[in-house]
Amino acid sequence: MNITLLGAYNPAALKGLMSGSDRKAAVESALAAVGGTLEHLAFTRGGYDVVVRATVPDSTSLVGLVVAIKATGAFEKADYLEEIDIAAVLDVANKIAYTPPA
């Protein structure tokens, strides 16, 4: 599955980044631990400092990866996006006949 990870470092992590920490190697290692691969790593300006595009085997691997990343305390904000097959989602949605409360 294709994913995007978004992270805003805390001040201590930014200091580590300034000292020359190899973030690409760290991201590749973390992804490899769950059977994933890095597609793209970008440092950004704005609400997030880093954006990672990657593949992981399944949602359990994704959530485990995010829990491990958040547990380091290196991020003030860490979010993830899971790419979906919108056609398949809409096929399911169109089969549902839900009546809202009146």
Image: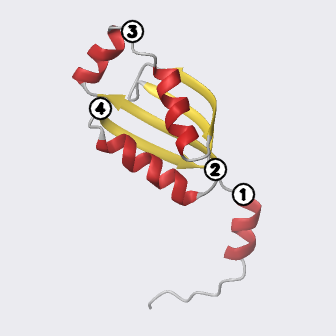
- Residue 74: assigned label: 4
Q: CA distance from mark 2 to mark 1?
A: 7 Å
Along the line of sight, the residue nearer the viewer: 101 or 23: 23
Along the line of sight, the residue nearer the viewer: 17 or 3: 17
Question: Mark 4, mark 2: which one is toward the viewer?
Answer: 4
| Residue on which disc 1 sits | 85
Q: For numbered disc 4, what is the local secondary structure?
A: loop
Residue 94 in the image: above or below residue 36: below
Q: Amino acid at mark 3?
A: Gly
Label whose residue precedes the other's in the sequence (2 or 3): 3
Residue 56 pos. (x, y %): 62, 47
Residue 30 pos. (x, y %): 49, 37
Q: Amino acid at mark 2?
A: Glu
| Residue on which disc 2 sits | 83
- Residue 20: assigned label: 3
Residue 13 in the image: above or below residue 100: above
Q: Is residue 96 left or right of residue 7?
A: right
Identify the image quadrant of the C terminus: bottom left
